[in-house]
Image: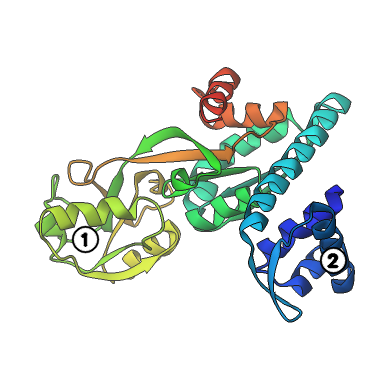
Amino acid sequence: MNLQQLRYLNEIVRRGLNISDAAAALYTSQPGISKQIKLLEEELGTEIFVRNGKRIVALTAPGKTILDIARRILHESDNLKQVGQEYQDQDSGQLVLATTHTQARYVLPPVVKQFIKRYPKVKLGLHQGNPTQIAEQVLNREADVAIASESIMLFDGLISLPCYEWHHCVVVPAKHPLADVKRPTLAKLAQYPIITYDFAFSGRSKIDEAFGAAHINPNIALTAIDADVIKTYVELGLGIGILAELAFIPERDRHLRKIDVSHLFKPTTTHLAIRKNEYLRGYTYDFIELFAPHLTREAVTKAMHINL
């Protein structure tokens, strides 16, 4: 048994039991992977996969247990490498962030600027997607940290840490009838076409919950995955926008007016997630604290210990 066999096993499952896709992802041959899996099964004395002819169709019952153990071994193997890299060169390496457009566009820039200034040798990567996608990227080791306001706290393989709360606001053109309304009601908002986030993004569930609790059916005319698109269509007069307050920048959004609706929608919490039982490089702890100052190394380590 060797680590390469365990990597082959893990990748086959990750690729939907498609050996060809696993071979392509690992830059090896399909026959080579098949041979190594057979050798692993022979050594363990049990079949890992259910086969229909030459095609793999499922994991066997022992195969599921073997996969869980294999993933833990691979995880700890990666942790060992991280320890070595940490003590070989503490100020260089790679950190990949997976996040949504709102975080990448409006929250992360000053944090990234500080981080790069502090760690110029660390290669920083930024992946964007919806909350489910970015959580899966961290679970699959395609990214190190996930940052989002929805869903990522629901994944068993991740430790989710609350960072900060924010509210939604309404944006309208300068001459819109709502522009001078100080405390609009949900019924008042529902009189106009609404442009807001797709359900998976930026606290959309809080918007739907508020209208649902009031038994009001809003006219959601258009949904988008980022605030810039929402503001663009509001400027065109296609409706009123409901978006994250942090995405409204007065100097840049001069043609729009922001209306406080914190009395209508519950606050949303942005979370940061990392893999359970992960060995974090020193600069990863520093990035987390730059993003959320209350998440010190001690606080993160304590949270990881609690979730063991």
- Residue underneath mark 2: 33
Residue sitting at 28 percent across and 48 percent down?
A: 169
Residue farthest toward the front in the current orientation of the protein: 45
Q: Position of residue 297 (x, y in %)?
A: 60, 21
Mark 2 or 1, closer to the camera:
2
Figure quadrant of residue 298:
top right
**Residue pictured at 16% horizontal, 57% vertical:** 212
Above-or-below relation of 95 to 101: above
Residue 142 in view in this figure: no
The numbered mark at residue 263 is: none
Q: Earlier in the sequence, mark 2 or mark 1?
A: 2
- Name above or below for residue 272 compared with residue 216: above
| Residue 59 makes an appearance in the image | yes
**Observer-nearest of 22 and 97:** 22
Q: Secondary structure at mark 1?
A: loop
Looking at numbered disc 2 in the image, what kind of residue is underneath it? Ile
Q: Is residue 129 above or below residue 154?
A: below
In this picture, residue 286 sits left or right of residue 101: right
Where residue 30 appears, as percent x and y from the top left, is 85, 72
Judge from the rendering whether residue 212 lies leftward or rightward of residue 283; answer left or right.
left
Residue 199: where, in percent of width, then height? 36, 61
* Mark 1 nearby-residue class (10 Å; few <14, some 14–19, many ≥20): few
**Residue with the mark numbered 1:** 175
- Residue drawn at (15%, 50%), measured in percent from left and top? 180
Q: Residue at x 30, y 47 (%)?
A: 168
Residue 9 image-quadrant placement: bottom right
- Please state if 15 lies on the left or on the right of 197 as rendered: right
